[in-house]
Amino acid sequence: MVEVMIQNFEKLDFNRKIDVLVAVYVFGWDDITIYADGDYFICTGVQVQKGSRAYEVILNYSILLTSAWEIVQKFDYLYLFRGGKKWMGGKWECKLVWGDTDKIDDKLYGWAETEMLAICYAGLKAVGFNVEGFLKEEGKV
């Protein structure tokens, strides 16, 4: 997988980093610019009108289920399950695959506290992104 350099990526909060990674690696965006506009970081992508100014912003895949569902729609097979408190600590488990579901690789499951993050992790893993490595870098593991 080709690593994509995203200027100012480190200034984003964790969830927006996930959103940007999904845009780049799952949806194939190759022109990402992150810049500050007051208290907000704006990223190129889907155009949104804010007052008299038009912005292009990346969807909130990691916190909105309607946005995360955009990821699901790119795949042929979805498995989404919430574990019990004793088993899996109540975390969500997600798996997304293309094509033949008989060739399911257990390493492609995304585990997270919310269904949206589990979908994001599963989508990133399905396209070959090293989610565990990223989570370690971010201090989330």
Image (cartoon, rainbow, N blue to C red):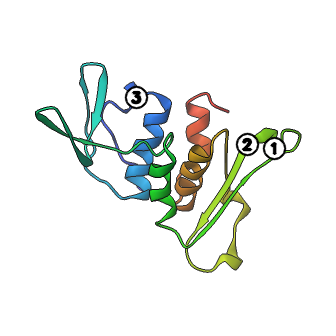
Q: CA distance from mark 1 to mark 3?
A: 29 Å
Q: Amino acid at mark 3?
A: Leu
The reply to whether callout 2 and callout 1 are in contact (CB within 8 Å) is: yes
Answer above or below: position of 27 versus 50.
Answer: below
Q: Mark 2 sits on what residue?
A: 91
Q: Amino acid at mark 1?
A: Met
The reply to whether callout 1 and callout 3 are in contact (CB within 8 Å) is: no
Pick out the residue farthest to the right: 86
Residue 107 falls left or right of residue 35:
right
Task: Name the spot of residue 80 as percent of width and height, x first.
Answer: 67, 57
Q: Residue at x 73, y 42 (%)?
A: 91
Mark 1 or mark 3: name the one nearer the start of the chain: 3
Task: Name the spot of residue 52 as percent of width and height, x first.
Answer: 10, 33
Q: Mark 1 sits on what residue?
A: 88
Label 1 environment density (alpha carbons within 10 Å; few <14, some 14–19, many ≥20): few
Q: Quadrant of the C terminus?
A: top right
Foreground residue among 84 and 27:
84
Q: Mark 3 sits on what residue?
A: 12
Q: CA distance from mark 2 to mark 3?
A: 24 Å
Task: Name the spot of residue 34 as percent of width and height, x first.
Answer: 28, 34
Task: Tell me the quarter of the picture where residue 132 sits.
Answer: top right
Label 2 environment density (alpha carbons within 10 Å; few <14, some 14–19, many ≥20): some
Residue 1 visible in the snapshot: no
Q: Amino acid at mark 2?
A: Lys
Answer above or below: position of 66 versus 134.
Answer: below
The reply to whether callout 2 and callout 3 are in contact (CB within 8 Å) is: no
Answer above or below: position of 54 versus 99.
Answer: above
Task: Name the spot of residue 36 as percent of width and height, x first.
Answer: 25, 25
Label 3 environment density (alpha carbons within 10 Å; few <14, some 14–19, many ≥20): some
Q: Of helix, strand and loop, which one carries label 3? A: loop
Foreground residue among 43 and 60:
60
